[in-house]
Amino acid sequence: VGVDCLLTGEIDHHDAIMARERDLPVVCLGHFASEAAAMPYFADALRTEAPSLEFVVSQSDADPMASLA
């Protein structure tokens, strides 16, 4: 598809193998890291579309994988 690298929040085993076979570098951030950074932008977009509603980005989320390190 003409890309230099695949940036994703998740990749399954077979897709990772296929990427390796095609010499395609993969950066897998994990769900928490990839989604947490985008939440303020998503909330702003929702506020624009639905100004009568309140959208709050959680400040108490934690990376569930951090405890495994």
Image (cartoon, helix red, strand yellow):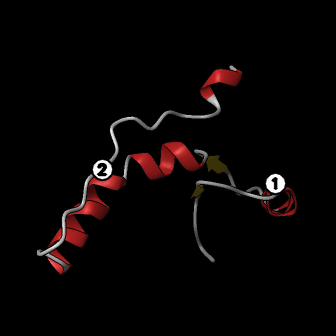
- In-front residue for pair 52/22: 52
* Mark 2 surroundings within 10 Å by alpha-carbon count, few (fewer than 14), some (14 through 19), many (20 or more): few
In the displayed structure, 37 sits above or below 4; it is: above
Secondary structure, mark 2, is loop
- In-front residue for pair 33/63: 63
| Residue 14 as seen in the image, left or right of residue 48 | right
- In-front residue for pair 54/19: 54
Q: Residue 30: x and y, percent?
A: 61, 46
If the image is split into quadrants, where does the N terminus sit?
Answer: bottom right
Give the quarter of the image for residue 54: bottom left
If the image is split into quadrants, where does the C terminus sit?
Answer: top right
User: At label 1, which amino acid type do we have?
Assistant: Arg
Kindly identify the residue that appears in the image at 38 percent across and 46 percent down. Answer: 37
Q: Which residue is mark 1?
A: 20
Residue 57 shows which numbered tag? 2
| Residue 51 as seen in the image, left or right of residue 27 | left
In the displayed structure, 20 sits above or below 47; it is: above
* Mark 1 surroundings within 10 Å by alpha-carbon count, few (fewer than 14), some (14 through 19), many (20 or more): few
User: At label 2, which amino acid type do we have?
Assistant: Val
